[in-house]
Amino acid sequence: AKLKASLAQSLVRRECHRVAEQELNFCTRNNIRPIAVGDAEYPVHLLECPDYPHVVYVKGDIDFNCGHWLSMVGTRKARLTEIRCVID
């Protein structure tokens, strides 16, 4: 995937470094592992998606490239219809 020109310029100017450092510190304090595209642990099947995430965040031990696994994506403000869908 290509970076947008505005994001690339922001990276060169180091505008995002402070925020990225805060996020990494949060991950460290909470035992969360960020796994980026290109890392050996990155789930290869995600690369088949046209809008794959460049970073996945993992809590606990898992080998994405071996066997079966389950992913959970949540929201802080779930609607009633979404909650019913999960319960059913």
Image: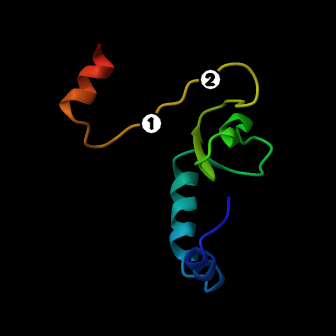
Q: Which x, y percent locates residue 64?
A: 70, 31
Q: Amino acid at mark 1?
A: Val
Return the residue found at the far front: 50
Q: Quadrant of residue 86?
A: top left
Q: Amino acid at mark 2?
A: Trp
Q: Does the rendering let one see residue 32?
A: no
Query: Which residue shows up at 77% across the image and 49% down it?
Result: 39
Nearest the viewer among 44 and 56 is: 44
Please, what secondary structure does the residue beneath circle 2 have? loop
Query: Which residue shows up at 72% across the image and 19% down it?
Result: 67
Q: Does the rendering let one see residue 53?
A: yes
Give the CA separation, mark 1 to mark 2: 13 Å
Viewport quadrant of the N terminus: bottom right
- In this figure, which residue is indicated by the disc labeled 2? 69
Query: Which residue shows up at 57% across the image and 74% down it?
Result: 7
Question: From the viewer's perspective, is 73 left or right of 69?
Answer: left
Q: Which x, y percent locates residue 54?
A: 63, 53
Q: Which mark is residue 82?
A: none
Question: From the viewer's perspective, is 44 left or right of 4?
Answer: right
Nearest the viewer among 59 and 53 is: 53
Question: From the viewer's perspective, is 4 left or right of 88?
Answer: right
Q: Which mark is residue 73?
A: 1
Query: Which residue shows up at 29% across the image and 17% down it?
Result: 87
Please, what secondary structure does the residue beneath circle 1 have? loop
Q: Which x, y percent locates residue 59?
A: 57, 38
Viewport quadrant of the C terminus: top left
- Residue 19, placed above or below residue 28: below
